[in-house]
Image (cartoon, rainbow, N blue to C red):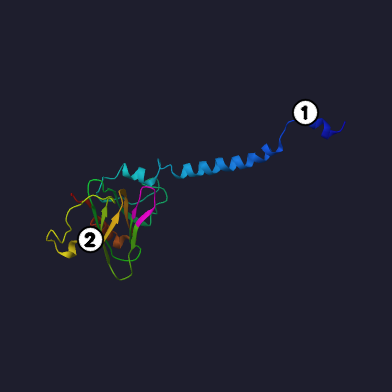
């Protein structure tokens, strides 16, 4: 007898197509695990920060130092003001000044996707005034103009987001500018407006 006949006697009903299906099954399991991991936000930046930041209130964070980072990979070359917002109870008004290049304001969903982003320009201060709405069909009251407020107090932009993070970033330009930059960060506002 030869080797082929011995193998045929040992595994008479072995189907080689099952062996070929193993890589296909492994690929399917890999894809499912990848998609499930992408939707797992238990240890996300939003979860970490929303637990320590007051709701709908802008907070200037202390300078980033090794071992004292609110999030991994935040650079020590910048100062931050952050707000965990929720528009569930009503619109959220956001106001910030971006006085120079390097400054930025970002509005992010809990999954990390960007809702809005603005950056400062050289020699031209940019005032960002926006209102974040819940994005459903609720009546949110009259517009500021209908209430008799001047048009200048009305937000320049309206966004739809239920909850997330607002991050104002200021570059660290050195000790001579630090006090002024922190004063500008402290003026950034994030406040809920009742219906």
Q: Is residue 111 magenta?
A: yes
Stretch in magenta: 107-115
Q: Quadrant of residue 186?
A: bottom left
In the image, what residue occupies the spot 82% across and 30% down?
6
Image-based side of 43 in relation to 35, left or right: left
- The quadrant of the picture occupied by the N terminus is top right
Query: Residue 136, image x and y in percent?
Result: 28, 50
Of discs 1 and 2, which sits in the foreground?
1
In the image, what residue occupies the spot 67% across and 41% down?
20
* Dot 1 or dot 2, earlier in sequence: 1
Give SS at disc 1.
Answer: helix
Q: Quadrant of residue 115?
A: bottom left
Vertical position of residue 9 compared to residue 189: above or below: above
Q: Who is closer to the viewer here, 161 or 116?
A: 161
Res. 93 visible in picture: yes
Q: Residues within 10 Å of mark 2 (few under 14, many from 20)?
A: some
Res. 171 visible in picture: no
Numbered circle sitting on residue 10: 1
Query: Residue 95, image x and y in percent?
Result: 24, 58
Considering every residue shown, the one lying at the far bottom of the view is: 123
Disc 1 from disc 2: Cα separation: 79 Å
Query: Residue 126, image x and y in percent?
Result: 28, 66
Q: Who is closer to the viewer here, 125 or 146?
A: 146
Q: Circle 2 sits on which residue?
A: 155
Image-based side of 53 in relation to 114, left or right: left
Image-based side of 44 in relation to 154, left or right: right
Q: Residues within 10 Å of mark 1 (few under 14, many from 20)?
A: few
Vertical position of residue 125 compared to residue 94: above or below: below
Give SS at disc 2.
Answer: loop
Considering every residue shown, the one lying at the far top of the view is: 10
């Amino acid at each position: 007898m030869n080797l082929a006949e011995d193998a045929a006697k040992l595994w008479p009903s072995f189907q080689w197509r099952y062996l070929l299906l193993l890589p296909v099954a492994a690929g399917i399991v890999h894809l499912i695990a990848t998609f499930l991991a992408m939707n797992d936000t238990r240890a996300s930046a939003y979860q970490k920060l929303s637990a320590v930041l007051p709701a709908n209130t802008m907070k200037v964070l202390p300078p980033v130092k090794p071992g004292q980072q609110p999030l991994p990979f935040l650079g020590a070359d910048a100062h931050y003001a952050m707000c965990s917002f929720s528009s569930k109870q009503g619109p959220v008004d956001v106001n910030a000044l971006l006085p120079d290049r390097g400054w930025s304001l970002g509005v992010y969903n809990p999954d990390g996707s960007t809702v809005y982003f603005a950056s400062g320009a050289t020699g031209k201060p940019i005032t960002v005034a926006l209102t974040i709405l819940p994005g459903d069909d609720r009546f949110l009251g009259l517009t500021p103009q209908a209430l008799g407020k001047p048009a200048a107090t009305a937000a320049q932009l309206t966004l739809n987001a239920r909850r997330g993070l607002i991050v104002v970033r200021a570059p660290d330009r050195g000790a001579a500018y630090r006090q002024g930059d922190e004063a500008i960060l402290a003026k950034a506002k994030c406040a809920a407006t009742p219906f």
